[in-house]
């Protein structure tokens, strides 16, 4: 088989890239290890920056997002019994879209299937060949048969545990990592959200987040130990702990219900450089991971896709390789800003096991400064709604 762009990974990065390329008549083949149902069964964050909203519009997949998503022009930050609001629209003139990542991925699958997109599910043994040579190609097995795709370019959109990053030689790759000493226990419940905007809570018992998917589907998280497993937490225990971490007014009005999904996610900051090796380009989680605190995972994958899509367009439409030559440097500039914001927000909002009394004083001083200083609020809001591409 032959295609212009072989895309490894059918998550949001791979599907968004495939759909955008399609709008310019640039063909691609997506290779996905899992089934479509498995991919669409993943529950992930649900705050979209304006950049991603615009990309979904450019990809022709934004109708349901605009119909069912919620625009949020603010969020609340609580610490102890204090709580203050960040007014995104007043501070930046911008807002975020609350719409589940699962729904973003579903909309992209629907669009690709409508336009006859080539997606192969349940593929195995994907391997990248000659990425830095004259004949880049990808091999894989499907239904026990070995296949080969010859291509002009390979997009490694296969997430943190994929094969693409490993295709860049160790002597070329530089990796940066920070693992946090706690996780997030998250639940989904068919209950009305406790508040119409998100609440990020720093309590003496640890971090908590009150989020939502729609007016009758809520998403809550509490910081938990890395040694915890979801089975260690009954629904009642989760609700009890959440109530102890959020302000009393919200704890008293919290509507609880059975968890329809319960999982624990570890927190990690990770970046690999470069994000390009010959004709191989890494996108999204294949190249970088952020702690979920600032909801930057999907949004940083989106900016990678934006840069790569425009670079490939420039190559095919204008014969210019300037975009692909500058892709890694340009994408990494924005990746590191997202890493910094996610690390800073996580450090301010979580309780660390080895935290000294002084560290705690610094956290509270950070929160007090953010609460009282417009410039600090503006900096936070600019990062939260999304820095420019
Ligand atoms: N071959 C084919 N597909 C693979 C392989 C492989 N060897 N390894 C992984 N995959 C698939 C996974 O099954 C997954 O569907 O690649 C896809 C990668 O998707 P994500 O992990 O969602 O990564 P990405 O598309 O970059 O999206 C980033 O999604 O996971 C969240 O927190 C992340 O919000 C961020 C966003
Ligand atoms: C979510 O709704 O899952 C969510 C929202 C905001 C975050 C992280 C997760 O910062």
Image (cartoon, rainbow, N blue to C red):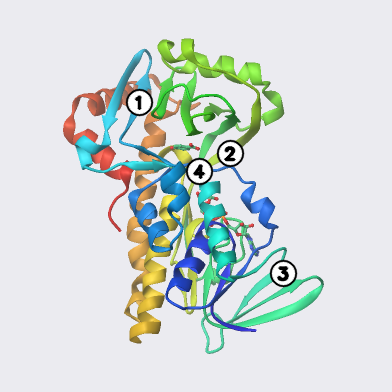
Whole-percent x and y of residue 74?
Answer: 31, 32
Residue assigned mark 1: 77
Question: Horizontally, is 138 left or right of 170 in the view?
Answer: right
Residue assigned mark 3: 125
Whole-percent x and y of residue 67?
Answer: 44, 45
Q: Nearer the viewer, mark 1 or mark 3?
A: 1
Badge 1 marks a residue whose secondary structure is: strand
Question: Visible in this render: residue 3?
Answer: yes
Residue assigned mark 2: 265
Whole-percent x and y of residue 15?
Answer: 53, 62
Q: Nearer the viewer, mark 4 or mark 3?
A: 4
Badge 3 marks a residue whose secondary structure is: strand
Q: Earlier in the sequence, mark 4 or mark 3?
A: 4
Residue at 40% of width from left, 83% of height from top? 316
Q: Would you say the beta carbon of the disc 4 residue lies within 8 angstroms of ligand 2?
A: yes
Residue assigned mark 4: 100
Q: Earlier in the sequence, mark 1 or mark 3?
A: 1
Mark 4, other Cα within 10 Å: few <14 / some 14–19 / many ≥20: many
User: How many discs appear?
Assistant: 4
């Amino acid at each position: 088989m032959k295609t212009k762009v072989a895309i490894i990974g059918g998550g949001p990065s791979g599907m968004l890239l495939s759909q955008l390329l399609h709008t310019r008549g640039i063909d691609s083949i997506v290779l996905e290890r899992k089934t479509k149902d498995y991919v669409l069964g993943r529950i992930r964050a649900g705050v979209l920056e304006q950049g991603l909203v615009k990309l979904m519009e450019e990809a022709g997949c934004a109708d349901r997002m605009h119909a069912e998503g919620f625009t949020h022009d603010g969020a609340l930050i609580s610490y102890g019994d204090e709580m203050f609001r960040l007014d995104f629209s007043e501070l930046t003139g911008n807002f975020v879209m609350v719409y589940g990542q699962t729904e973003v991925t579903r909309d992209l699958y629907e669009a690709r299937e409508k336009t006859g997109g080539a997606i192969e599910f349940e593929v195995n043994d994907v391997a990248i060949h000659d990425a830095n040579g004259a004949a880049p190609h990808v091999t894989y097995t499907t239904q026990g048969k070995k296949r080969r795709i010859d291509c002009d370019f390979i997009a490694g959109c296969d997430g943190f545990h994929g094969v693409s990053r490993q295709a860049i030689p160790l002597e070329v790759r530089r990796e940066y990592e920070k693992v946090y000493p706690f996780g997030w226990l998250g639940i989904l419940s068919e209950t009305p959200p406790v508040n119409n905007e998100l609440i990020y809570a720093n309590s003496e018992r640890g971090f908590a987040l009150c989020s939502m998917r729609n007016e009758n589907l809520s998403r809550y998280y509490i910081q938990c130990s890395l040694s915890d497993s979801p089975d260690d937490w009954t629904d009642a225990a989760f609700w009890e702990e959440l109530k102890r971490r959020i302000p009393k007014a919200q704890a008293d009005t919290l509507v609880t219900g059975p968890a329809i999904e319960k999982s624990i996610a570890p927190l990690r900051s990770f970046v690999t450089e470069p994000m390009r090796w010959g004709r191989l380009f890494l996108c999204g989680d294949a190249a970088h991971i952020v702690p979920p605190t600032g909801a930057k995972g999907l949004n940083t994958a989106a900016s990678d896709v934006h840069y790569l899509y425009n670079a490939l367009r420039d190559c095919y439409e204008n014969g210019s390789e300037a975009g692909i030559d500058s892709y890694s440097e340009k994408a990494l500039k924005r990746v590191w800003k997202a890493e910094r914001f996610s690390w800073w927000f996580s450090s301010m909002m979580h309780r660390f096991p080895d935290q000294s009394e002084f560290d705690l004083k610094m956290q509270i001083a950070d929160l007090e400064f953010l609460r009282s200083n417009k410039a600090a609020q503006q900096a936070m809001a600019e990062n939260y709604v999304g820095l420019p591409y």
